[in-house]
Image (cartoon, rainbow, N blue to C red):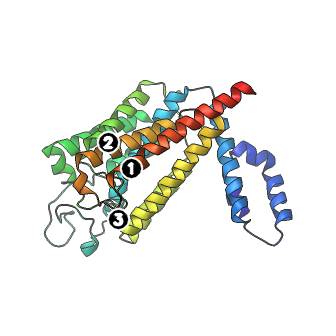
Amino acid sequence: MNRLLIAAFPEPYRSQQGKEVLACLAEAYPGRSWPPPREVAALIRAGVQTRARAVVGDTSRPWWLDGIHLAALALAALALVPYLQDVYHWALRIDPGEHAIVFHFSGWYPWAEGPTRTRLLPYGLLPLVCLAALLRGRAWIALPAAAAMMWAGSTSHGRVVFGDEGVAGLGYYGLGAPITARNVLLSLALCAACAVLALCRPGRLRRRSYSWLAPVALALFVAGGLHITSVSPTFQRGMFALEVAALITAWVATSATGDHRWLIPVAAVAIVRTQAIVDQPTTFIQSLPNVVVLILLIAPLLVLVLSAQHRQGQALTE
């Protein structure tokens, strides 16, 4: 199990010092397959810091381009969340029956039982294609998918192809989730980010391993196999925990390097979320006061900015 911890470090570090780290863990905690929680947190933090320094040390691309790439990935994942179950059922030709995702209509596909409105494709297929293409650094594939998301969410013709994909439901923790196809700002921001990336030389974009698609496949399986919709408390709590982990990772990377690239995806998600709440405040459960919700969305931005400035100040004094 200790090998899972050193996976937080980049591959060059693992190949050079991985055996030494594993030996130290085995010596410090004999007979244990997993170190204490404090040691786990320290190792993960050190791994994130090492990865962040390696990313900043790579001068083959400007920091803002990498930040826009991360923002596009975050927006594509945010757009995919409400439709994980739908894509899974479509791919396996499953009729979810009473477990259907809460659309404004009960329509599915020709093979579904009961009253349906036939649609050709699930809307969630578009952000999924966009996410997979961006992971591999192929913005020229992600751009038309993002443009199709705008078309589907803003025109009646798009709803004929993808259905009336406004998910009926409420955000569990009051942070403006889920954000659906009808929120054109999300697809507009994603399309703009993909357009900027597509204008750059393909070699300048970071290409991530296919292994990054494993969590996406797992999310599809969990949501579709267990019939967990994006408006259920279980899904929303899991999403909240994942977002908190992502924000902590961004903070650790920023405080270690003083680089602003991780601020861009956090800002993009915060803007889209804030617009969704301001535009349709009654759509989301008021589990928290509006002022508290907006503070929770804005506070991470301030923390990242202050962390970057503090690290830059330390670098000047060293």
**In the image, which disc is placed on residue 186?**
2
Marks 1 and 2: in contact by CB < 8 Å? yes
Q: Is the residue under label 3 in contact with that under label 1 (CB below 8 Å)?
A: no
Report which quarter residue 145 is drawn in.
top left
- Label drawn at residue 92: 3
Residue at image mark 1: 78
Q: Residues within 10 Å of mark 2 (few under 14, many from 20)?
A: many
Q: From the top left corner, tell me how far across and down residue 83 is, in percent.
A: 32, 57
* Among numbered discs 2 and 3, the one appearing first in the sequence: 3
Q: Residue at x 19, y 54 (%)?
A: 163
Determine crowd level at label 3: few under 14, some 14-19, many 20+ residues with C-alpha closer than 10 A: few
Q: Secondary structure at mark 1?
A: helix
In terms of sequence position, does the residue under pointer 2 or pointer 1 come before the other?
1
Q: Residue furthest bottom?
A: 98
Using the numbered discs, state the Cα–Cα distance from disc 2 to disc 3 in whole angstroms. Answer: 28 Å
Q: Position of residue 186 (x, y in %)?
A: 32, 42
Say whether residue 166 is visible: no
- Compared with residue 212, is residue 26 higher up or lower down, i.e. above or below? below
Q: Residue furthest right?
A: 27
Q: Amino acid at mark 3?
A: Leu
Q: Residue at x 14, y 44 (%)?
A: 157
Q: Is residue 264 above or below residue 209?
A: above
In the rendered structure, which amino acid carries the disc numbered 1?
Answer: Leu
Q: Is residue 29 visible?
A: yes
Q: From the viewer's perspective, tell me whether residue 79 is left or right of residue 314.
A: left
Q: Horizontal placement of 159 versus 179: left or right?
A: left
- For mark 2, give the secondary structure: helix
Tag shown at residue 301:
none
Q: Amino acid at mark 2?
A: Leu
